[in-house]
Image (tube, rainbow, N blue to C red):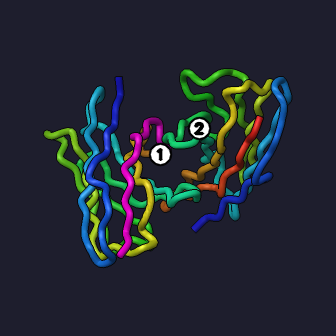
């Protein structure tokens, strides 16, 4: 059974950092592109970042470019999101999403981890 | 970025009704349109991909249509478990973008 489990969320002050992890199981992580999508409280879905299966083709939303960094360790079946210089507007539930076939279609989503940026 | 606009923003319907939600893209996206259902406190679930392909395990009462800029998600006979918020998403170019959501109340 495919499972994605996010962790690492929490409360952080503006300007602080957090590192999210997404542990994958039930499939071969190295065969799939992966994404992070976030959802602010009571709001809609917003794509954040994407990483290809090898970790060489990466893209970010303009809103996080230069502050967030996506990476992966296929040997550990884990995808990461390093978030620096956090802002109040980064407050959201962050979902780890498996891409069906490099088409940006998310067929499996984790349960999400809440990041709260507040002083 | 491509803007995705859904209508209506909210919808109330009864069990057994046929329901349609529309999604319009700000430019042509061919058939690169996907639909997700989200229930409160839960992650989104993929329903339809490539405009009209039903994701495995999704009931056949869900269907999708459209191409270019205009798309529709239809539910043929609404069931109580179909409540939630529905999002369209374009996967034509990066960044992929989502509609603002349609909240369906039964």
Residue placed most toward the observer, B98 or A39:
A39
**Residue B49 circle label:** 2
Q: Quadrant of residue A86?
A: bottom left
Residue at the left extreme of this rendering: A75
Identity of the residue drawn at 65% across and 40% down: B84
Q: CA distance from mark 2 to mark 1?
A: 10 Å
Q: State the quadrant of the N terminus of chain B.
A: bottom right
Element type at mark 1: loop
- In the image, residue A112 lies in the stretch drawn in magenta: yes
**Residue A115 circle label:** none
Q: Chain of mark 2?
A: B
Can you give x and y, in whole percent of width and height, for residue B40 in the image? 57, 42
Horizontal relation, residue B12 to residue A54: left or right: right
Horizontal relation, residue A106 to residue A86: left or right: right
Identity of the residue drawn at 33% across and 77% down: A14
Give the magenta range. A104-119
Identity of the residue drawn at 62% across and 46% down: B33
| A30 to A25, vertically: above or below | below
Residue named by callout 1? A103
């Amino acid at each position: 059974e495919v499972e994605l489990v996010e962790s690492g969320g929490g409360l952080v002050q503006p300007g602080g950092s957090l590192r999210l992890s997404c542990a994958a199981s039930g499939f071969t992580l190295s065969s799939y592109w992966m994404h992070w999508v976030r959802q602010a409280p009571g709001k809609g879905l917003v794509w954040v970042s994407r990483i290809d299966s090898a970790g060489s083709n990466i893209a970010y939303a303009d809103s996080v470019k230069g502050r967030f960094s996506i990476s992966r360790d296929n040997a550990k079946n884990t995808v990461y999101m390093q978030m620096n210089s956090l802002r109040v507007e980064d407050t959201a539930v962050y979902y780890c999403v498996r891409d069906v076939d490099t088409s940006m279609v998310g067929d499996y989503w984790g349960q999400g981890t809440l990041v709260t940026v507040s002083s | 970025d491509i803007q995705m606009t859904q209508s209506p923003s909210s919808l109330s319907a009864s069990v057994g009704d046929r329901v349609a939600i529309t999604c319009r893209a700000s430019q042509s996206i061919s058939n690169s349109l996907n639909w997700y259902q989200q229930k409160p406190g839960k992650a989104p679930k993929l329903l339809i991909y490539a405009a009209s392909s039903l994701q495995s395990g999704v009931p056949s009462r869900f269907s999708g249509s459209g191409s270019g800029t205009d798309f529709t998600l239809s539910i043929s006979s609404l069931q109580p478990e179909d409540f939630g918020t529905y999002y369209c998403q374009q996967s034509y170019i990066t960044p992929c973008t989502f509609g603002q959501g349609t909240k369906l109340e039964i």
